[in-house]
């Protein structure tokens, strides 16, 4: 039994929706295996599970997942990490403990308190999927060196976390927790309709066309919150790697989302028409071959250049028919730039002469 979901291969949100849905369903039952593929039109993907779940059963699992996360310590833990003395009591400056980007952390008291609270939140996690997600999301960095005598704490965060930081906004407290609460409050039928795309309900964005519910996975737009919940869970497939170089290139790297030559920022995701497992998807998106293919294309000035090399051969062998490259838009607000992935360009893996 398979289900078809409306999607758009040129929209990064759809890619993460696909793998995020699989991540949630597999986390619910470790014996379950999900398989998915793009359909020929690239306007939908097909999805099946080893235990033949139907769409109503999938929706029920997503409902329980959102409810569990909405009550969880990792999403609800918060404290004041700006304190300058161990004797200080927490003030009004509360930060979500598990947010990967935090500002105003005091040295050393705030960092010590944050580390203690993070350890407690991590100890409370219940599934391997919980650990995988927060590991991929990253954390404030104390290992990335300094800039203007301040720790570059944001360098430890995943590039896939794209919440705009104006007015103290943070990813966990300002986006993921409210989103989990919105999805948890829905009926299973409403979640099902949202997944299928038959009805769009954007509670967190007040159903406005300028909603940021997608959190940078596409440009501002009204976005169903059940879909957004699954898509943001898709970040778990893209691990963040710690870098300790201590120079201007010290930011931790994130799988499949890159910054090269200063302003050049892009994501690259695979397209495939045969069924893949979640494990295979994770292995391809974190591969050197996919990264090299994208960087080669971005840096190429010759549009007729044949991209057949070791990377292309490896990707083709794995069943990648094409890749979609998404440039990242960055606004000109220097203090709190807004970021999102633009519509993608589909590039065949093997370009014929």
Image (cartoon, rainbow, N blue to C red):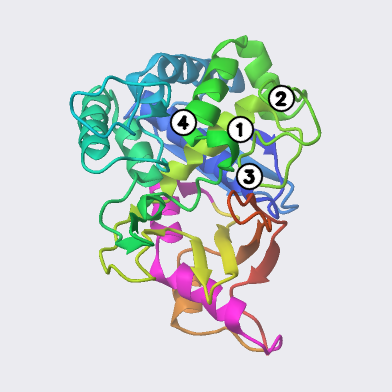
Residue labelled with disc 4 = 172
Q: Can residue 58 be seen in this view?
A: no
Q: How crowded is mark 4: few (under 14 residues within 10 Å), some or many (20 or more)?
A: many
In the foreground, 40 or 130: 130
Q: Please tell me whether mark 1 sits on a helix, a strand or a loop.
A: helix
Residue labelled with disc 1 = 228
Q: Is 54 displayed left or right of 96 in the figure? A: right
Marker disc for residue 202: 2
Q: Where is residue 299 in the image (x, y as percent from the top left)?
A: 59, 82
Part of the protein shown in magenta: 275-304
Residue labelled with disc 3 = 13
Q: How crowded is mark 1: few (under 14 residues within 10 Å), some or many (20 or more)?
A: many
Q: How far apart are marks 1 and 4 (CA)?
A: 14 Å
Going from N to C along the chain, the mark reached first, 3 or 1, is 3
Q: Distance between the residues labelled 2 and 3?
A: 15 Å
Q: Please tell me whether mark 4 sits on a helix, a strand or a loop.
A: helix
Going from N to C along the chain, the mark reached first, 4 or 3, is 3
Going from N to C along the chain, the mark reached first, 1 or 4, is 4
Tell me if residue 28 comes above or below residue 272 in the rendering: above
Q: Distance between the residues labelled 3 and 1?
A: 8 Å
Q: Position of residue 130 (x, y in %)?
A: 34, 31
Q: How crowded is mark 2: few (under 14 residues within 10 Å), some or many (20 or more)?
A: many
Q: Is 112 displayed left or right of 19 in the figure? A: left
């Amino acid at each position: 039994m398979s289900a078809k979901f409306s999607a758009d291969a040129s929209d990064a949100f759809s890619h993460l929706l696909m793998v995020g849905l699989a991540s949630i369903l597999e986390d619910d039952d470790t014996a379950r295996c999900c398989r998915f593929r793009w359909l020929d039109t690239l306007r939908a993907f097909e999805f099946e599970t080893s235990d033949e779940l139907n769409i109503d059963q999938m929706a029920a699992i997503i409902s329980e997942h959102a409810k569990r996360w909405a009550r969880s310590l990792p999403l609800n833990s918060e404290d004041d990490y700006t304190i300058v003395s161990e004797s200080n009591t927490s003030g009004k400056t509360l930060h979500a403990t598990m947010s990967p980007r935090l500002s105003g952390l005091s040295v050393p008291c705030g960092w010590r308190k944050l580390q203690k609270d993070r350890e407690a939140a991590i100890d409370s996690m219940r599934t391997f999927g919980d650990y995988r997600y927060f590991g991929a999301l990253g954390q404030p960095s104390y290992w990335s060196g300094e800039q203007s005598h301040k720790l570059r704490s944001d360098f430890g965060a995943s590039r896939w976390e794209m919440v705009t930081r104006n007015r103290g906004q943070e990813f966990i407290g300002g986006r993921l927790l409210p989103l989990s609460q919105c999805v948890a409050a829905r009926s299973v039928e409403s979640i099902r309709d949202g997944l299928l795309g038959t009805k769009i309900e954007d509670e967190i964005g007040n159903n406005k066309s300028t909603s940021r519910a997608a959190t940078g996975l596409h440009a501002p737009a009204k976005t169903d919150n059940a879909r957004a919940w699954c898509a943001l869970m898709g970040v778990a497939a893209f691990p963040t790697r710690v870098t300790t170089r201590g120079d201007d290139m010290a930011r931790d790297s994130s799988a499949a989302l890159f910054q090269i030559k200063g302003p050049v920022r892009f994501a690259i995701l695979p397209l495939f028409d045969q069924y893949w497992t979640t494990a295979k998807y994770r292995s391809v998106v974190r591969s050197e071959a996919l990264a090299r293919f994208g960087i080669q294309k971005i840096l190429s000035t010759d549009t007729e250049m044949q991209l057949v090399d070791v990377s292309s051969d490896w990707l083709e062998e794995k069943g990648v028919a094409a890749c979609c490259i998404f440039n990242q838009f960055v606004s000109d607000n220097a203090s709190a730039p807004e970021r999102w992935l633009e519509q993608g360009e589909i590039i065949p893996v093997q370009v014929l002469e």
